Amino acid sequence: MSIRTEPGPRERLLEAAQELTYRHGVGVGVDALLKSANVARRSLYEHFGGKDGLIAEVLRRSAAEDEAGYEQTMRAAGDDPRERLLAVFDKLATVVTEPNFRGCRYLAADLALADPAHPGHAITRRYRERVSRLLADELVRLGHPHPAHAADQLLLLIDGALAAGATRPDTNPVLSARELAEQLLAQRGNQDDPARPTQLAP
């Protein structure tokens, strides 16, 4: 007979903070976090050193989960790099319609954490770098002339789609982002300087 063990204080704090900081932002109060996790204040400091450490660990945990989500989405789309990249936008189209969708966790955290030295900023930066590399790897396979630059452009479209999905969902931002992504992926024969403005087809 298996014995079910309940999550300890550290795990409960992480789960509560991951949910509440996404729903209400990283400015959510410590008391609300402790109440939701059903732990004493001492546990927060023992496991994370304080709220800043908890926020950083939540961002690190979320980033690992979301990066794995990108990989799973592209893997499920097959072997064609173009289809794998566009599958990301198809997934986003589903994400932004979920009832609990509140936009991009990482953008919201960067805007709310006023201290540039907060450890959360380094975590969100590394997360974006890893996602950009995932996209760039597919662009290399696709034969795009400027994969790193194009990956940054795709990431910009993703960020914009998530932001607009939270603030202007009626405009169908993910569809617009996907259309722009399709044009970007079609530039395989364009060897122009990536720093020059791209002329998109009407």
Image (cartoon, rainbow, N blue to C red):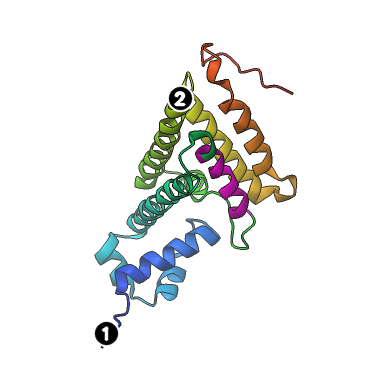
Q: Nearer the viewer, residue 201 or 52?
A: 201
- Which range is magenta? 84-96
40 relative to 91 in the view: left or right: left
**Residue at the image position 47 percent from the left and 27 percent from the top:** 142
Q: Is residue 97 left or right of residue 21?
A: right
At label 2, which amino acid type do we have?
Pro
Could you tell me how many numbered marks the image carries? 2
Amino acid at circle 1: Ser
Q: Does the magenta-highlighted stretch encompass residue 85?
A: yes
Residue 49 seen in the current view: yes
Residue holding disc 2: 147
Q: Quadrant of the C terminus?
A: top right
Q: CA distance from mark 1 to mark 2?
A: 50 Å
Query: Observer-nearest residue: 107 or 83?
Result: 83
Q: Examine the rendered structure and indicate whether residue 40 appears above or below residue 174.
A: below
Question: Residue drawn 36% across and 51% down?
Answer: 60
Across and down, in percent, residue 39 comes to: 35, 76
Is residue 28 at least partly visible in the picture?
no
Picture coordinates of residue 71, whole percent (x, y):
42, 46
Magenta residue check for 132: no
Instruction: Name the secondary structure under disc 2.
Output: helix
> Alpha-carbon neighbours of circle 2 within 10 Å: few (<14), some, or many (≥20)?
many
Residue 186: x and y in percent read 59, 24
SS category of the residue bearing label 1: loop
| Side of 193 where 182 appears, left or right | right
Q: Main secondary structure of the magenta part?
A: helix
Q: Which mark is residue 148?
A: none
Residue matched to label 1: 2
Please rate how many residues cluster around mark 1, counting C-alpha atoms within 10 Å: few if below 14, some from 14 to 19, many from 20.
few
Seen as rendered, the residue at the extreme front is 79
The answer to whether residue 111 is left or right of residue 124 is right
